Amino acid sequence: MSFFTCISKKKKQAFIDENDEKFNLDYKKWIEECDKISSDNSIAAALYSEEFEKWEKEKNEFLRNKEEFNKGIDELFASYREGDKDASEILMQMIQM
């Protein structure tokens, strides 16, 4: 604000009004940007949550399959230790793969 603007009440009020208007427009734009960012973040969070749940299901299925596979290997190895000829052949074939 210039010196002459400070002296003249009319110019001072015009300066204040002009800057209030600029502030209000900038504030309105800022609020709109904040709302858009919040909306985008909500969408991203929902998508992340959905993808995370999908990944959790796939992970749990993988772990379950791995556990079943390992259990089968353990059973074959136990049969091998007991002298089962078929189990030893199957284990050897698995090792050669």
Image (cartoon, rainbow, N blue to C red):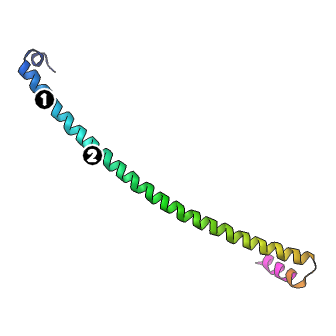
Quarter placement of the N terminus:
top left
Disc 1 target residue: 17
**First in residue order: circle 2 vs circle 1:** 1
Magenta range:
88-97
Left or right, 3 with respect to 34, comes to: left
Left or right, 49 with respect to 40, comes to: right
Query: Looking at the image, which residue sits at the far bottom?
Result: 86
Crowd tier of the residue under label 2, counting other residues whose Cα lies within 10 Å: few below 14, some 14–19, many 20 or above: few
Residue drawn at point x = 12 percent, y = 26 percent = 15
Q: Nearer the viewer, residue 2 or 55?
A: 55
Question: Which percent across, then down, holds residue 94?
Answer: 78, 78
Question: Which percent across, then down, holds residue 75?
Answer: 83, 75
Question: Which percent across, then down, holds residue 26?
Answer: 23, 38
- Give the spatial CA distance, label 2 vs label 1: 22 Å
Left or right, 76 with respect to 28, comes to: right
Local SS, label 1: helix
Label 1 is placed on what type of residue?
A: Asp
Q: Relative to 64, is 89 above or below? A: below
Which image quadrant for residue 76? Answer: bottom right
Disc 2 target residue: 32
Which image quadrant for residue 18? Answer: top left
Q: Relative to 65, is 4 above or below? A: above
